[in-house]
Amino acid sequence: QPISTPAKRRPRQLSVSYYAKSCPQLEQLIGSITSQQFKEAPVSAPATIRLFFHDCFVEGCDASILIATNPGNKILAEKDAEDNKDLRTEGFDTITRAKTLVESKCPGVVSCADILAIAARDFVHLAGGPYYQVKKGRWDGKISKASRVPYNLPHANSTVDQLIKLFSSKGLTVQDLVVLSGAHTIGFARCKHFVARLYDYKGTMQPDPAIDPRLLKALKMSCPHAGGNADIVAPFDVTTPFLFDHAYYANLEGKLGLLASDQGLFLDPRTKPLVQSLGQDKAKFFQAFSAAMDKMGSIGVKRGRTHGEKRKVCSTHM
Ligand code: HEM
Ligand SMILES: [Ca+2]
Ligand SMILES: [Ca+2]
């Protein structure tokens, strides 16, 4: 049972103009880094969007995901939790670079949590998705513990029921779940997250009947039942893996979902109608995604020194 984060309480007020006086050029500074990163390494886009999601779901959007485990400390930080080990370095690198630039122009005022929220938005837009205003004013968190990660994040084999419960514990609706899952319109997953669907679905020794036979064949070639290369990945969206569009939803209707948790959204009567309507309407998806990112971006937000800090280096507490 997921423990609810402070999102359950009324989220503290964030505002679009939070740094208008203290760092007016903030979004341009971050934008110069994100556009450069996107050119050099396009996977920075999915990497950073996922990083933001994993931050917000554990302790709220407070950059707790960026803290490095102290050498010699037995307590691991969040990023060293099993569920976070496959977060790409490109996401962390982007935030480090952006923070360095921001500190050189506006020292000591901008939180790492806000930089992550802005960078994630930039990458949604750079990859072809919507542009939306980001509300700011998050403080960085003082707690980052690997032990708090597993029950706060969804898993590839989570049931729709479990997903709905987890999202609801963060103040997110069934619609938010379906809409935010649309982030899987870009990016990749390692074989271990879906290999059971290919060879032994729920202990049947048969593939998941909800996979298109051609996709099944292709995925089996990349991912052997056992002993495969752990670094092999497959695209979430077989049609446009680098473009942030609404193809993810039509793919689910065509049995082209990669994870059980993706395909499940088309199989459950509570989520299927939403998948169908988003698959037909890109403008609707873009509008709903912008709103849902804003909502996710306010989970467990901290303000002030009691629960928060403004880090100088995102990977270390003050
Ligand atoms: C609904 C439940 C969700 C589950 C079960 C889930 C699970 C996963 C898994 C297993 C991966 C592959 C990791 C790897 O092998 O490297 C992944 C990747 C990804 N996820 Fe999710 N995810 C969910 C929701 C979300 C949400 C809400 C977002 C953002 C709003 C998101 C954004 C991404 C992105 C962009 C990637 C690709 C990362 C990359 O290529 O580096 N996911 N997710
Ligand atoms: Ca966090
Ligand atoms: Ca796509």
Image (cartoon, helix red, strand yellow):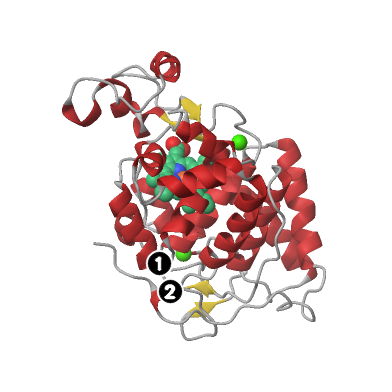
Looking at the rendered structure, the secondary structure element under dot 2 is helix
In the image, what residue type sits under mark 1? Lys
Asked if 199 appears above or below 171 in the picture, the reply is above
Task: Please report the residue visible at 29 percent of the width from the left and 57 percent of the height from the top.
Answer: 151
How far is the residue under mark 2 from the one under mark 1? 6 Å
- Reading the chain from its start, which is encountered first: label 2 or label 1? 2
Q: Which residue is mark 1?
A: 170
Task: Say which of 286 and 243 sits in front.
Answer: 286
Q: Whole-percent x and y of residue 121?
A: 66, 56
Visible residue check, residue 281: yes
Pointers 2 and 1 in contact (C-beta within 8 Å): yes
Q: Which residue is mark 2?
A: 7
Left or right: residue 285 compared with residue 220: right
Q: Whole-percent x and y of residue 129?
A: 68, 47
Asked if 310 appears above or below 40 in the picture, the reply is below
Task: Say which of 95 and 301 sits in front.
Answer: 301
- The image quadrant where one finds the N terminus is bottom left
In the image, what residue type sits under mark 2? Ala
Query: Splitting the image into four quadrants, where does ligand 3 fall?
Result: top right
- Crowding at label 1, few (<14), some or many (≥20) Cα neighbours within 10 Å? many
Looking at the rendered structure, the secondary structure element under dot 1 is loop
- Crowding at label 2, few (<14), some or many (≥20) Cα neighbours within 10 Å? many
